[in-house]
Amino acid sequence: MKSSTVTFRADASKGFPELAAQLGSIGLNLVLWDATGQCDSQLEPSCELCRTVCQAGQGCLEQAGRLAGQSISRGGCEHAVLPGGCCLLALPLRKRRRVVGTATVCYPSREMIEKDSLARLASRLSLDCQALAEMAQRDCRYRLSDAEHLAKLVEWMLDRGQAEATFRDELANLSANLAATYEELSLLYRISGSMRVTRESADFLHTVCEDLVEVMNISAAVAMEYTRPSVGGPDTIVIAGEIDLPVADLKALLTDFVVPRFAEESRPIVENDFAAGAAATGKVVRSLVAVPLATEDSRIGVLVGLNKITGDFDSVDIKLLNSIANQASVFLANSHLYADREDLLMGVLHALTATIDAKDPYTCGHSQRVAIISRRIAEEMDFPPDRVEQIYLCGLLHDIGKIGVPESVLTKPGRLDANEYERVRLHPSIGARILGGIRQLDEVVEGLLTHHERPDGQGYPQGLSGPGLPLDGLIIGLADSFDAMTSDRTYRKALPLQSVISEIREYAGTQFDKKVVSVFLSMDLEKLLVEARQEAQTIFPANNAEERQE
């Protein structure tokens, strides 16, 4: 019989139960042996004849073992006819040209019936010859001459079984990899969706670290954002997960070990046996992976994963961490740019309000106090943060139109005449025109334009009334009046707080909106006054009034 070899792509035992059942269904008995000749499976006779003679002590398994050993040592297919007429085949199993085991297949041949083999077998094993003959008529399907064809069939089925087993393994691995990739893509998508430029960077980084702990299967994740040179102060440290290490020690680990490495080169750091930090961390940190947070022209911080729970940090972890770091770097860079531009805008707006202070020493700091009071009212009314800041800006800029009012009118002692009063009444419209060309302040302009409108329609410049009045303007109007009544003016001294409260309560529903008044009077107004006067600032202190008028 020609030599035959089965090439195994995986472990020889994979798929054996299914393969043994398939061969058993066609009357062939399969047994696997390892490279040392040890049996790797059980002999499960496929027919009643084989079960009977095996149970009676025929010793088929021992004879198959000897033939398997020959096949392993010779490296080829072996063939033998056992006492009684059974046919035995042994096919070497190879993996990358190396013999890793043997498959033996046996079957009862038709020659057992045609010769006296059954009688001798029955006599030797003390079995009923007639019963064996009936079993043989039913179970002996193949002749000894069929051995070569059956060997090829077995070889093909072994190859196919191994291919199927390998395919199932690869499919399982692919499914696991797809699941992991899905988690990683979901993480990237969640991070992309949370990259709002107005979001606090510490909050964003904490979300990133929490997601990394879950997806990377690590004990903790740490992010450090370098402070901006224009702001100063300490670097920001964000931690998610569980790590039995004080924040100061974690920061020392980053600044002493991670950051200097990135100063030399920006390649990821992988330490699966973190001996270098044992002294500083007390062996709490067993392993770490770190990547820089950076753009083309600046270093923003570092992102670190600590203590892989199962296995070691590998290239997959590095690739994921790099992807997250790239997105986080874009967010932080944009956040810094946004913050710088916001600082510039606020600086310009404060400078504009300071021009009003320069014209009227008696209203020094008034715009900032109105802004602070308006913000507190908006917070008490549970407005979202963006709306609160919008109202703060509106309060800060509400009198910007007074730039167009002569100083002689603004600083006039005593009451204004009708013509002068009309000049003052123009300042909301002037302010709206000044800021109207700034798209980012469109929503602020409405509150600025309407902060002197009244629910009873007696306000200006448009005489609006009813429930349609913009709420921002009503809030600014109340804050404006409150600060005016509690401040010294050219024509009177500041009113006592209780008198101011009575005045506001009396004019609720006419000059002031009832709902805004209700919220305002529920606040701690004494504390609000202290807060407004502490935070209010101007580039022209009140005691320099004479110097400014020269």
Image (cartoon, rainbow, N blue to C red):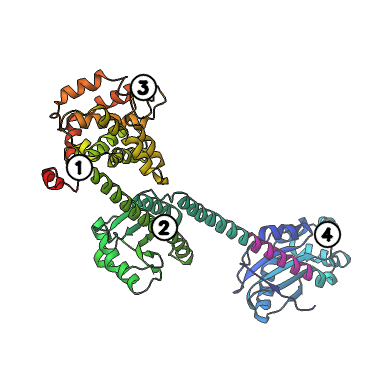
N-term mark: 3 or 2: 2
| Left or right: 528 in relation to 267 | left
Instruction: Residue under label 2, please give it.
Output: 328
Q: Determine the residue positioned at 83% across, 59% down.
A: 136
What is the spatial separation of the Cα atoms under label 4 and label 3, in whole angstroms?
A: 114 Å
N-term mark: 4 or 3: 4
Q: Is residue 191 magenta?
A: no
Circle 4 Cα neighbour tier, 10 Å, few/some/many (<14 / 14–19 / ≥20) = many
What is the spatial separation of the Cα atoms under label 2 and label 1, in whole angstroms?
A: 34 Å
Tag nearer the camera, 4 or 3: 3
Tag nearer the camera, 3 or 2: 3
Tell me if label 1 and label 3 are in contact, CB under 8 Å: no
Q: Determine the residue positioned at 42% across, 49% down.
A: 196
What amino acid type is highlighted by mark number 3?
Gly
Instruction: Residue under label 3, please give it.
Output: 457
Q: Judging from the image, what secondary structure is the residue with disc 1 in?
A: helix
